């Protein structure tokens, strides 16, 4: 069997993590989510987990200003390189599903992988996911979602020429609103990715 790699990039609160977890069960392939990658990167690079988390928070609170100061850019490059090293080590270990942390940027041209973008246009479902999964109150969820979107946008514009969310950048794009009634029920979406793989 050839190595199988799936990389998920997603719109925040689109339930991509639930698709990946479903695929982990269906395919028996290890799933590394954002938090898993953060923890492993901290351990392997020696960068404190708190520094990695604070950098995420800094990007999320950028108030839609896409420019980063030079010292922030230096730290960001160090963090990006640490994530890159971790992602490449994980891929060397064999079959895997990776989510975010620029995995699609890192792996482009290095290994063949199914590049999946997951999105949702239904703000009510996004808010429901935020409340049920992250514990964000409904009234605060739209602003929280916007901050997460900004964090991911800045990360991509800083470290790649990839236009995040542009459909032509990906092998498969899934609108989770189309395939689920329950905002966390991702079985059909997982089956679509499995067939595509």
Image (cartoon, rainbow, N blue to C red):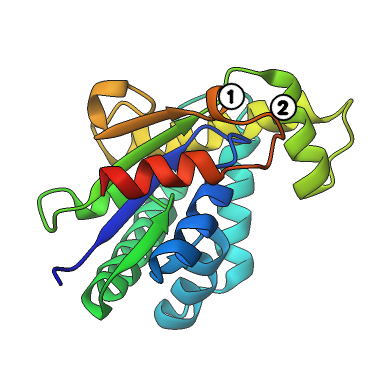
Q: Which quadrant holds residue 185? A: top right
Q: Which quadrant holds residue 112? A: bottom left
Check whether the beta carbons of the residues at disc 1 and disc 2 lie within 8 A of each other.
Answer: yes
Front residue of 140 and 1: 1
Q: CA distance from mark 1 to mark 2?
A: 8 Å
| Residue 117 shown left or right of residue 43 in the figure | left
Residue at figure coordinates x 39%, y 35% from the top left: 117
Q: Is residue 172 above or below residue 80?
A: above
> What count of labels does the image hold?
2
In front: mark 1 or mark 2? 1
**Location of residue 180 in the rendering, given as x and y in whole percent from the top left corner:** 62, 31
**Location of residue 188 in the rendering, given as x and y in whole percent from the top left corner:** 51, 40
Q: Residue furthest left?
A: 109
Residue 111 seen anywhere in this rendered image of the structure? yes
**Location of residue 12 in the rendering, given as x and y in whole percent from the top left corner:** 58, 35
Question: Which quadrant is home to the N terminus?
Answer: bottom left
Judging by the rendered image, the residue that carries numbered circle 2 is 125
Which tag, 1 or 2, sits closer to the chain's start? 2
| Residue 191 shown left or right of residue 133 in the figure | left
Front residue of 83 and 112: 112
Residue at figure coordinates x 56%, y 74% from the top left: 48
Residue 68 seen anywhere in this rendered image of the structure? no
Q: Is residue 167 above or below residue 48?
A: above
Residue at figure coordinates x 24%, y 29% from the top left: 169
Residue 177's disc is 1
Neighbours of disc 2 within 10 Å: few (<14), some (14-19), many (20+): many
């Amino acid at each position: 069997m050839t190595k199988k790699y799936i990389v998920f990039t997603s719109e925040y609160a689109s339930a991509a993590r639930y698709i990946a977890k479903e695929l982990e069960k269906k395919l028996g392939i290890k799933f590394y989510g954002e938090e898993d990658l953060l923890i492993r990167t901290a351990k392997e690079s020696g960068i404190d987990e708190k520094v990695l988390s604070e950098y995420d928070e800094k990007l999320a609170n950028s108030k839609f200003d896409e420019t980063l100061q030079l010292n922030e850019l230096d730290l960001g490059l160090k963090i990006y390189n640490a994530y890159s090293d971790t992602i490449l080590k994980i891929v060397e270990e064999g079959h895997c599903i990776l989510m975010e942390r620029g995995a699609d940027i890192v792996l482009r041209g290095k290994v063949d992988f199914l590049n999946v973008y997951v999105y949702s246009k239904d703000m009510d479902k996004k808010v429901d996911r935020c409340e049920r999964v992250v514990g964000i109150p409904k009234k605060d969820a739209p602003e929280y979602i916007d901050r997460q979107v900004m964090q991911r946008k800045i990360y991509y514009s800083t470290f790649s020429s990839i236009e995040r969310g542009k459909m032509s950048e990906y092998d498969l794009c899934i609108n989770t609103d189309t395939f689920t009634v329950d905002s966390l029920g991702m079985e059909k979406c997982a089956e679509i990715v499995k067939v595509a793989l």
